[in-house]
Image (tube, rainbow, N blue to C red):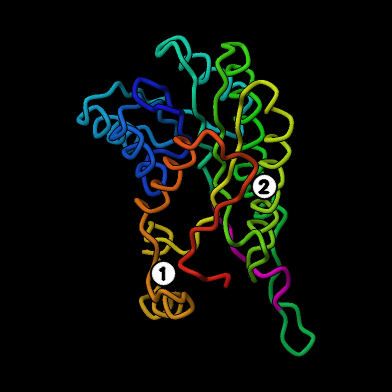
Amino acid sequence: MQLSKKVVVITGAARGLGRAMALAFAARGADVAALDRDAAALAETAAQCEALGVRARAYVADVTSEPDVIRAFDAVTSDLARFDVLVNNAGITRDALLIKAQEGEIHSKMSLAQWQAVLDVNLTGVFLCGREGAERMIQRGQGGLIVNISSISREGNPGQTNYSAAKAGVAAMTVVWAKELARYGIRAAAIAPGFCSTEILSAMKPEMVERVKAAVPLRRLGEPAEIAATAVFIAENDFVTGRVFEVDGGLRL
């Protein structure tokens, strides 16, 4: 896909990986529709994209709300007249052990609220945006691309029953969509990032960050721009579909 003048819709675009992907697509000449709940940070993302000479629009929306998603996607097609690429990036964590016990005494357990919050954003949000994005691509009749952000945690990460389950679901949905939507010229692929330099990791204690780095064969964290470059590669290679790209510094070798 030639990205110049195409419209790329990115959820969770206010900061971190989402902002990096917005800037990467803008640098290739694509117009950007940025979605997030944080209006101020979202406006900054849009401004940085516009500084690269493309059109950029900010849409405050909650991906767990069906009416919000429909309203935002309708606005994108009205404002920018296209809907070529969707990047499902919005995500949260609510980490906790399933059960924490010592000598048979239960100290804590993952709450239903922790489970549901992560599934709502990281799985249901991807479903809603994917469905509505695919509908608009089909209506235009010019194909398109959906890129879902999964995670290496989809293989199972202690303390992340909720997150691992959601990201495994995202990877599975990606394969299903690649098979179902190919007849309409729509591709679907996913990226499974490893540990990256984002706000989530920056909030960790320095010694914990060093432990994370030590577990990565390349002995460093990934940069958001490296994940963004993968998304651009997927978009520009029209023979890529149905795959989950692991960008993790060799963590899963």
Which of disc 1 and disc 2 is earlier in sequence? 2
The local crowd at label 1, few if under 14, some if 14 to 19, many if 20 or more residues have their Cα within 10 Å, is few
Q: Position of residue 146 (x, y in %)?
A: 56, 33
Picture residue at 39% right of the left edge, 81% below the top: 207
Where residue 235 sits: x, y (%)? 47, 35
Instruction: Label 2: state its secondary structure.
Output: helix
Part of the protein shown in magenta: 92-100
The location of residue 119, given as percent across then percent down, is 67, 47
Residue 21 badge = none
Q: Is residue 142 above or below residue 216?
A: above
Q: Amino acid at mark 1?
A: Met
User: On the picture, is 82 further left or further right than 14?
Assistant: right
Image-based side of 40 in relation to 104, left or right: left
The C terminus lies in quadrant: bottom right
The residue sitting at 70% across, 59% down in the picture is: 111
Q: Horizontal and vertical percent for residue 249?
A: 45, 67
Q: Secondary structure at mark 1?
A: loop
Name the quarter where the N terminus is drawn: top left
Between 97 and 231, the one lying in front of the other is 231
Q: Nearer the viewer, residue 218 or 241?
A: 241
What residue is shown with label 2? 119
Q: Quadrant of residue 152?
A: bottom right
Residue drawn at (39%, 79%), measured in percent from left and top? 210
Residue placed furthest toward the front: 239
Q: Which residue is disc 1 drawn over? A: 204
The type of residue carrying mark 2 is Leu
> Is residue 94 a member of the stretch shown in magenta?
yes
Number of callouts: 2
Q: Residues within 10 Å of mark 2 (few under 14, many from 20)?
A: many
